[in-house]
Image: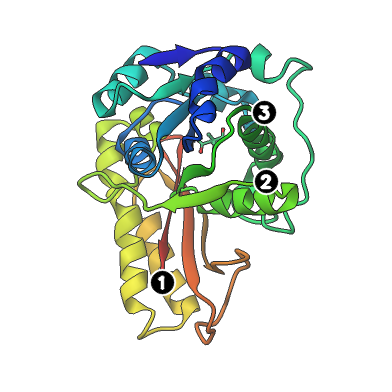
Amino acid sequence: MKVVRTKKALAAALAPVLKNNQSIGLVPTMGALHAGHLSLVSKALSENDKVVVSIFINPTQFNNAADLAAYPAGLTADAALLKNLSDSILIFAPTAQEMYPEGLESKVFDFKGLDMYWEGADRPGHFNGVGTVVEKLFRAVPAQKAYFGEKDFQQLAIIRQLVLDLDWPIEIIGCPIVREANGLAMSSRNERLSETAREQAAVIYQTLLRCQKDLKYHEIAALKNTALEKLSSCPGLKVHYFEFVRAHDLKPIVSKATSDPIRLLIAVSLGGVRLIDNIAI
Ligand code: PAF
């Protein structure tokens, strides 16, 4: 299992792969790997000759210093999990200095309004930080495919837009959400939940499923009222947003009389931990 820390070492490790015209799949992560990440890596391994997993806690996408400081890190444990999948994986774990030699600045992107709502509204600058680091990773890793989880549904839409804007020759593969036994979407942030909060968090997916089932019987406003009542009865849970949106542009919808695919997005805080989830309707 090879771990490289610099772009130079990364290029050297990938030189034989490129020389042999082998395909490269990239799985960008911020570490603290869980079964959700491992499902992306497994898919990448099944579709590419070489898989690069980047592990970098990107400071520019955190608009809150406490959130950045609390983000779990553990390269040794991450490397062990990856080694279990395949010894052939190449880990790119750069320092902030390596990724941002000119200082921790984000580029400003035009995401065509995709960043206007939801995480973009609640976390100013977040998606410019994501776009900046993902572009840097695409430049560093000459991959044909990159793998992202659908849990971060807005991030996935933004990365697809970024690739269009940059006209970057890479295929973006969105992968299904992996859930804990009680339905809670896998996230590195789940490690920060108390045992009680982790149990309570089951209400998030239960509410999404209920709305998915009931949309044929009720209008959106009625579903939202019932759902918000259920969520607010959970002690310590604060809803940031709970919205039915058009899947392609993430604009909120108020009537189910639409032929556009609908996605239901949610963000809550539970015991001070921000959790997001979504479901196709
Ligand atoms: O989803 C993540 O873990 C991060 O936002 C990403 C895509 C690795 C960029 O830092």
Q: Position of residue 218 (x, y in %)?
A: 40, 84
Q: Which residue is mark 3?
A: 60
Q: Amino acid at mark 3?
A: Thr
Q: Position of residue 272 (x, y in %)?
A: 46, 34
* Label 3 CB less than 8 angstroms from ligand 1: no
C-alpha span from label 1 to label 3: 33 Å
C-alpha span from label 3 to label 2: 22 Å
Q: Earlier in the sequence, mark 1 or mark 3?
A: 3
In which quadrant of the rendered image does the N terminus lie? top left
Q: Is residue 189 left or right of residue 221?
A: left
Residue at left 44%, top 14%?
Answer: 3
Q: Position of residue 15 (x, y in %)?
A: 55, 21
Dot 1: element: loop
Q: Amino acid at mark 1?
A: Ile
Q: Amino acid at mark 2?
A: Trp
Dots 3 and 2: beta carbons under 8 Å? no
Q: Which residue is mark 2?
A: 168
Nearer mark to the viewer, of 2 and 1: 2
Decide: few, some or many residues near mark 1? Use Cα within 10 Å; few <14, some 14-19, many ≥20: some
In this view, the residue in front, 14 or 110, is 14
Residue at left 64%, top 31%?
Answer: 133
Q: Is residue 257 left or right of residue 226?
A: right
What scheme was used to colour the molecule? rainbow
Q: Which residue is mark 1?
A: 281
Q: Is residue 239 visible?
A: no
Q: Is residue 69 left or right of residue 131?
A: left
Decide: few, some or many residues near mark 3? Use Cα within 10 Å; few <14, some 14-19, many ≥20: many
